[in-house]
Image: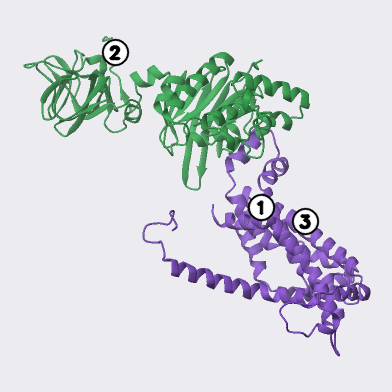
Chain colours: A green, B purple
């Protein structure tokens, strides 16, 4: 039985370690039942943020709210939050059954009630046969399920997960990813999940919060952050290979606005005029198409290497000073040293401010009528 | 041939045999005084000055003599009480201090720890007189409590347990906090059960040290021979030593220590090896 209120709100949450700001004024609203993934590279502050939500680390500034209650100064044991750790943190001296029942014993449940609840959770996670084993006698996947069971057994307000799949091998990770997603759907529980793995984030999240150097770069659904990255950082972090980013200039041409760089001229599909300005032009490798001979514009590139990914191929090319990757179904029909012309549809082009790295959007100037 | 030795490190048979012989000789050198102690205690009273390697004929007269002249059983019991209480006290205080130093952050933590460690450098001789005077004021001279209380804080115990706790997975402590345990609850439900082998080894080491202690009990218990190490001196006199009962009592005093080592040596060695390897 799930509890009703498990909305988590962070208000300008900040954590400094000496002169280093690990988390910088992060505000987030995690709705009830949401699966929010905190995504970012190592050292971006995502685990620090999760530990502040858990109460394991006191924030330097800011507030944490669970439902309507301010829990900023509430100790972890009274927060009604369960956490799954990267190392699983199973108690080595206790059996699986006692590990799962540990939070209930701490809350003074009767032995009979604990036994019943542990059996229920163990059955749900396929752990019934393993209840008498010690953690050292379990495989990585089994340990991960026990850690999950220990979190589930409490029926907590929300789940916090700190890279719980990073110690599993690739095959097990894919399976467990699906299991956690299914569990989330079944329970409808609020989950805050930390990872640096974009595949986990894209496949599991209802929303992704991308962090860089302690700052929140973008919050949105997986489709939003992938299709409309808010900054160069987000564009570069999501996608494999990463989005092609080329230092370019937006200028007016006879066919409307275009992004230009050495060996690059891509029309933006905007019939307007604007003063020239430097930008960072972004285009995803799968959105580049190989144009036929004699086509005008596009990116003139030389193929430097072709990678075979099985069902797809990635061609790494050079266009002027920029490196450009093209991804498509195998075979792409390209070989090392080929000269190609690459094009992309205007709606697949992304522009970022050259100084701030933030996304640029075209907004026509408002029409003013003289008084 | 050692199949697991790294390439180029497989010594010749002669070299390895030489090493074994050297180690064997060193071992004999260590064991011989203990053997001589038991050999002497088992000689007939008129033979105690014999130099034959094997004590023959065997005799338990020295043991009977020792029992008749001293309450050896009472002394062994008192020594056991001192050793057990002293070890338990040091373990408890060491555990609490090490937990605070390793698992918590508080103002002046580092200087306090260094100060604590620094007390190890203060020789026993520098503190024995103030301790003695304090015991006198508290009326604890000539009591077992007077022997035990000043030894209750062991820097060695704190250092060793802190090292183990520093390498203790922090996520386990965090998990227990999330699971609803207080700091006190975490200590007893997670830390102590996980550190049980280390605590057992340290406890044995502290108990053996307390068992073998002579100087401090000799100061506190000047008018009695309440513990076994002091009982030994009753066989030593200005007119000569009563070697038979002396060796018999010393032999009895060693037995509990040997028994502990025999049964628990693997745990003791493991704990100390692990404390140096994170």
- Disc 3 target residue: B88
Question: Mark number for residue A96?
Answer: none
Q: Position of residue B183 (x, y in %)?
A: 70, 42
Q: Residue at x 71, y 39 (%)?
A: B182
For the question of whether residue B109 can be seen, the reply is: no
For the question of whether residue A139 can be seen, the reply is: yes
Crowd around label 3: few <14 · some 14–19 · many ≥20 (10 Å):
some
- Disc 1 target residue: B198
- Give left or right: position of A284 versus A297: right
Frontmost residue, A255 versus B30: B30
Q: Residue at x 84, y 75 (%)?
A: B59
- Give left or right: position of B149 versus A178: right
Crowd around label 2: few <14 · some 14–19 · many ≥20 (10 Å):
few
Question: Mark number for residue A366?
Answer: 2
Q: Position of residue A21 (x, y in %)?
A: 47, 41
Q: Position of residue A104 (x, y in %)?
A: 71, 28
Identify the subunit bearing mark 2. Answer: A
First along the sequence among labels 1 and 3 = 3
Q: Residue at x 22, y 29 (%)?
A: A246
Identify the subunit bearing mark 1. Answer: B
Quarter of the image for residue B134 reads bottom right
The answer to whether dots 1 and 2 both sit on one chain is no
CA separation, marks 1 and 2?
A: 76 Å
Frontmost residue, A308 versus B22: B22
């Amino acid at each position: 039985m799930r509890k009703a209120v498990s909305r988590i709100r962070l208000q300008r949450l900040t954590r400094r370690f000496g002169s280093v700001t690990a988390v910088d004024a992060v505000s987030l609203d995690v709705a009830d039942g949401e699966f929010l993934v905190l995504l970012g590279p190592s050292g971006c502050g995502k685990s620090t943020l999760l530990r502040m939500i858990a109460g394991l680390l006191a924030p330097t500034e800011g507030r944490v709210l669970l439902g309507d209650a301010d829990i900023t100064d509430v100790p972890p044991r009274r927060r009604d939050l369960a956490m799954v750790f990267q190392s699983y943190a199973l108690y080595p001296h206790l059996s699986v059954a006692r590990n799962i029942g540990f939070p209930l014993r701490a809350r003074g449940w009767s032995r009979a009630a604990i036994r019943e609840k542990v059996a229920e959770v163990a059955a749900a996670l396929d752990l019934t046969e393993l209840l008498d084993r010690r953690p050292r006698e379990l495989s990585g996947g089994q340990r991960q399920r026990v850690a999950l069971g220990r979190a589930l057994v409490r029926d907590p307000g929300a789940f916090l997960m700190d890279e719980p799949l990073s110690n599993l091998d690739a095959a097990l990770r894919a399976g467990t990813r699906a299991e956690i997603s299914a569990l989330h759907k079944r329970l409808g529980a609020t989950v805050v999940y930390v990872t640096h793995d974009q595949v986990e984030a894209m496949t599991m999240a209802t929303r992704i919060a991308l962090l860089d150097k302690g700052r929140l770069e973008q919050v949105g659904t997986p489709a939003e952050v992938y299709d409309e990255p808010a900054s160069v950082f987000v564009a570069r972090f999501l996608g494999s290979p990463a989005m092609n980013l080329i230092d370019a200039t937006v200028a007016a041409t006879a066919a409307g606005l275009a992004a230009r760089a050495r060996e690059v001229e891509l029309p933006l599909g905007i019939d307007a005029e604007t003063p020239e300005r430097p930008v960072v032009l972004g285009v995803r490798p799968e959105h580049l198409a190989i144009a036929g001979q004699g086509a005008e514009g596009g990116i003139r590139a030389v193929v430097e290497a072709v990678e075979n990914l099985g069902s797809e191929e990635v061609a790494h090319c050079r266009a002027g000073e920029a490196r450009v990757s093209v991804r498509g179904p195998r075979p792409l029909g390209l070989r090392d040293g080929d000269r190609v012309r690459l094009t992309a549809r205007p709606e697949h082009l992304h522009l970022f401010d050259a100084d701030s790295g933030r996304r640029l959007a075209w907004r026509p100037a408002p029409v003013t009528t003289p008084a | 041939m050692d199949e697991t030795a790294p390439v180029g490190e497989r010594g010749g048979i002669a070299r390895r045999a030489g090493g074994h012989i050297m180690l064997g000789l060193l071992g004999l050198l260590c064991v011989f005084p203990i053997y001589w102690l038991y050999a002497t205690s088992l000689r007939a009273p008129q033979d105690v000055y014999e130099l034959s390697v094997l004590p023959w004929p065997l005799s338990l007269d020295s043991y009977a003599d020792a029992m008749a002249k001293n309450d050896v059983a009472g002394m062994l019991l008192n020594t056991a009480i001192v050793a057990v209480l002293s070890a338990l006290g040091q373990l408890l205080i060491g555990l609490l201090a090490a937990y605070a130093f390793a698992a918590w952050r508080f103002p002046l933590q580092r200087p306090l720890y260094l100060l604590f460690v620094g007390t190890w450098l203060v020789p026993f001789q520098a503190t024995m007189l103030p301790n003695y005077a304090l015991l006198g004021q508290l009326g604890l001279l000539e009591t077992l409590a007077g022997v035990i209380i000043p030894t209750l804080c062991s820097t060695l115990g704190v250092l060793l347990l802190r090292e183990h706790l520093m390498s203790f997975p922090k996520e386990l402590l965090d998990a227990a906090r999330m699971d609803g345990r207080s700091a006190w609850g975490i200590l007893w439900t997670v830390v102590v059960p996980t550190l049980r082998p280390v605590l057992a080894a340290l406890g044995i080491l502290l108990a053996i040290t307390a068992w073998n202690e002579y100087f401090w009990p000799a100061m506190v218990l000047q008018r009695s021979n309440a513990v076994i190490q002091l009982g030994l001196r009753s066989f030593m006199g200005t007119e000569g030593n009563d070697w038979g009962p002396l060796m018999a009592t010393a032999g009895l005093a060693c037995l509990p220590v040997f028994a502990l080592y025999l049964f628990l040596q693997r745990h003791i060695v493991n704990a100390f090896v692990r404390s140096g390897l994170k």
